Amino acid sequence: MPVIAVLALDNVVAFDLTIPCQVFAAARRADSSPAYEIRVCAEPVVTATAWDQEAFRLSSRYGLDDARDADTVVVPGADPDRPPGPGVLRVLRDAVDRGATVASICTGAFVLAAAGLLDGRRATTHWRLAGLLAERHPEVEVDPSVLFVDEGRVLTSAGVAAGLDLCLHLVRRDLGAAVAADAARAIVMPPQRSGGQAQFIEHRDPDRDPDDLTPTLRWVEDNLDRPLSLADIAAQAAISTRSLSRRFRARTGTTPLRWVLDRRVQRARELLETTTLSVDRIARTAGFGSTEALRHHFARQVGTTPGAYRAAFQQP
């Protein structure tokens, strides 16, 4: 069973600390057994904060040494003005050296940067502190506009709730889209948000907002198998294509056609995992039209072929 080590440093952000615990605990295998072993690895007594106020203090049965054999080490946000101790830096560097995955939530990126793990890499953090991260670590390519960045063995996320997206992405990467979707439903999360979506997404009350796109998004989900142009979606929403693009960006952080493509790849992943349909049939059902188009977009987003993905993640 893969081991997730969550480092609870002093002044850890309470919400950031609980995100990986909740998401990875919600991931279940086909027989409903836990998919991960979770260890909260802490110094003897740790203060957890909420918006710079002490929320509670905690102790754990696991210390930093218990993270040394973890498959994934997650660093939640903490006070960026408190440099991590040498023991923390050693754990993180050793993790990368032995091929484990290291991920940060919010200001946890400052800890990864202090360990030198972000040098020459693209990374993100909370938008309010992105400038500070870039100033302190000019060798890091800081992108303040995205939800999370996947650099292979090293991942970083934006602030607070973006940690949910990052952890679900890790579940999806480890165990496939269907397991991640079940975990998202268990923690009452919306469908997948890709890492490239904007940190700033405008949320409105659909009961009071006549411009709400929820019915349109549902219609698109129900019609992924048919050709969908920008004009088709705008007609369904009864607005101009220009207004559709503007409202779509505000609602989802991306363009209408990019969102449709992401949903089609997601649909293909789920069908590859949960059905025995041929790749050609899945291509048509997900709206790609041809196997070649599915393979092209699947490789760009997932990094492998549909056949290899099915071999790795198909459920019994």
Image (cartoon, rainbow, N blue to C red):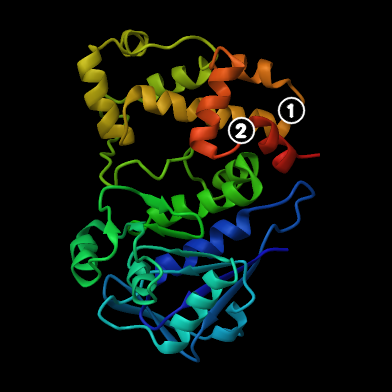
Three-letter code, disc 1: Thr
161 relative to 129, above or below: above
Measured from the top left, where is residue 231 in percent x and y? 32, 9
* Residue at x 31% of width, y 12% of height: 234
Labels 2 and 1 touching (C-beta < 8 A) = no
Q: CA distance from mark 2 to mark 1?
A: 10 Å
Q: Nearer the viewer, residue 61 or 195?
A: 195
Q: Within the image, what quadrant is residue 252 found in? A: top left
Q: Within the image, what quadrant is residue 117 found in? A: bottom left
Q: Which residue is mark 2?
A: 269
Q: Within the image, what quadrant is residue 1 found in? A: bottom right
Q: Which residue is mark 1?
A: 275
* Residue at x 35% of width, y 80% of height: 11
Numbered mark located on residue 199 in the image: none
Q: Quadrant of the C terminus?
A: top right
Structural crowding at the residue carrying mark 1, measured as other residues with C-alpha within 10 Å and reported as few (<14), some (14–19) or many (≥20): few
Measured from the top left, where is residue 272 in percent x and y? 68, 30
